[in-house]
Image (cartoon, rainbow, N blue to C red):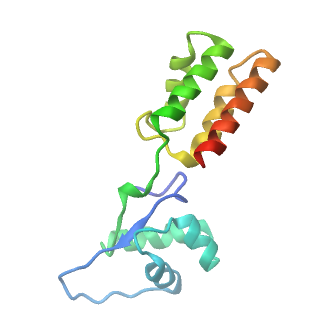
Amino acid sequence: MDISSGDISAMVFRRVVREDTAEYSFDAQMLTLFMELDGKKSLAVIAKKTGLKMSSLREAVNKLLKIKLIGPVAEAISAVDADFMDTLKRELSLAIGPLAQILIEDAVNDLGQSLTRFPTRRAPELVESLSREIQREDKRALFKQAMVRKIKEKGY
């Protein structure tokens, strides 16, 4: 798993039970992180709680991954639902026409995500990106207003 670049703030890790009894040397940051990892808290939550910078967490996570004392929790990322994507497509179609679906797919790919598992935390970023494709200011404003309402309604 490569976490040397990109946004790791939403990643969630858990401690791994090892059968071997090797001894490991932890620095203060590794120990602090290791004690906070519960398979539920994101690295952003841990950074806020511990006061560690994301760069320090990235380094500690890399070390802990190398010695196989932690593992990622894939299910922790909540994704937008079909209703959100339907609303996004409908509102964008009203603003720009039939190219809406293609623009959505391109924007999602540009953000390094997939349509089926698009993270809720990145919904505002997706809306902002798509709004830049709308030429007319009035239609752009209506699109943004509708999508902000939907994001609030969904609790994203």
Q: Where is residue 149 in the image (x, y as percent from the top left)?
A: 69, 37
Judging depth in this view, the residue of 1 and 129 nearest the camera is: 129
Left/right placement of residue 143 relative to residue 43 reads: right
- Which quarter of the image is occupied by the N terminus? bottom left
Left/right placement of residue 24 relative to residue 8 reads: left
- The single residue placed furthest to the right in the displayed view is 137
Judging depth in this view, the residue of 63 and 84 nearest the camera is: 84
Q: In which quarter of the image is residue 146?
A: top right
Q: Position of residue 59 (x, y in %)?
A: 50, 69
Judge whether residue 1 can be spotted in this image.
no
Judging depth in this view, the residue of 126 and 67 nearest the camera is: 126
**Residue drawn 45% across the image and 53% down it:** 77
In this rendering, the answer to whether 119 lies above or below 75 is above
Q: Position of residue 69 (x, y in %)?
A: 32, 76
**Residue drawn 40% across the image and 55% down it:** 2
Q: Position of residue 154 (x, y in %)?
A: 58, 44
**Residue drawn 78% across the image and 15% down it:** 136
Judge whether residue 9 can be spotted in this image.
yes
In this rendering, the answer to whether 154 lies above or below 132 is below
In this rendering, the answer to whether 136 lies above or below 27 is above
**Residue drawn 49% across the image and 25% down it:** 105
- The single residue placed furthest to the front in the displayed view is 153
Q: In which quarter of the image is residue 51?
A: bottom right
Judging depth in this view, the residue of 8 and 115 nearest the camera is: 115
- The single residue placed furthest to the top in the displayed view is 98
Q: How many marks?
A: 0
